Amino acid sequence: MKARDGGNGFYDTFRNRLMFPICDEGGRTIGFGGRVMPGSEDPAKYLNSPETPLFSKGRIAFGMDLARQKIVETRTVAVVEGYTDVVMAHQYGASNVVSVLGTALT
C-alpha cells in the first residue's frame, strides 16, 4: 500500500498486476514482482517490491532457487527478461533459466 498524493487515503501498489513471489536461493520469499495485465494504462511493465536489507533486485535473479541445481549440473545458465519467460522455460523443461529483475543487472 502507498499513500496517495495529498494524504487522501492509500492505494494498492500492485493493482492490475499478475504477482510472482521472488525467492532467495534457499526458496524463502523475500519480495514480490508484478507483471502488468493487458489493458492497464500503467507504463511500467514490471514492478518489484521496494529495496530492503533482504531484497535487493541487483543481487537476486528470479527463479534461481528452482534453477540452481540444473545450473550446477550443466554449468550453463540462460538469462531472460521477465518472470513469465522463466515460468514458460521451466514449464517446457529448460530448468536452467533465470531472469533479471527489471534493469537491475549489476
Image: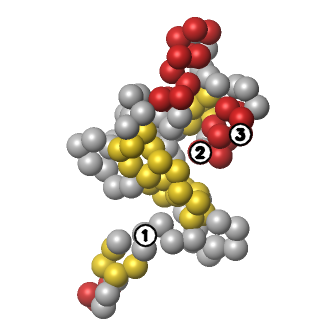
On the question of residue 106 being in view, the answer is no
Can residue 51 be seen at all in this image of the molecule? yes
Q: CA distance from mark 1 to mark 3?
A: 26 Å
Disc 1 secondary structure class:
loop
Q: Amino acid at mark 1?
A: Thr
At horizontal 53% and vertical 29% (from top left) the residue drawn is: 66
Q: Badge 1 is on which residue?
A: 13
Rendering quarter of residue 10 = bottom left
Q: What's the CA distance linking mark 2 and mark 3?
A: 9 Å
Q: Which residue is mark 2?
A: 83
> How many labels sit on residues?
3
Q: Quadrant of the C terminus?
A: top left
Q: How is the image coloured?
A: secondary structure
Check the image and name the residue furthest to the right. 92
Mark 3 secondary-structure assignment: helix
Residue marked by disc 3: 88
Residue at 31 percent of width and 50 percent of height: 51
Q: Are marks 1 and 3 in contact (CB under 8 Å)?
A: no
Label 1, label 2: how many angstroms apart (C-alpha)?
Answer: 18 Å
Q: Is residue 84 left or right of residue 10?
A: right
* 4 vs 64: above or below: below
Q: Position of residue 31 (x, y in %)?
A: 38, 49
Is residue 53 rendered to the left or right of residue 59? left
Q: Amino acid at mark 3?
A: Met
Q: Residue at x 48, y 53 (%)?
A: 33
The quarter of the rendered structure image containing the N terminus is bottom left
At mark 2, the secondary structure is helix
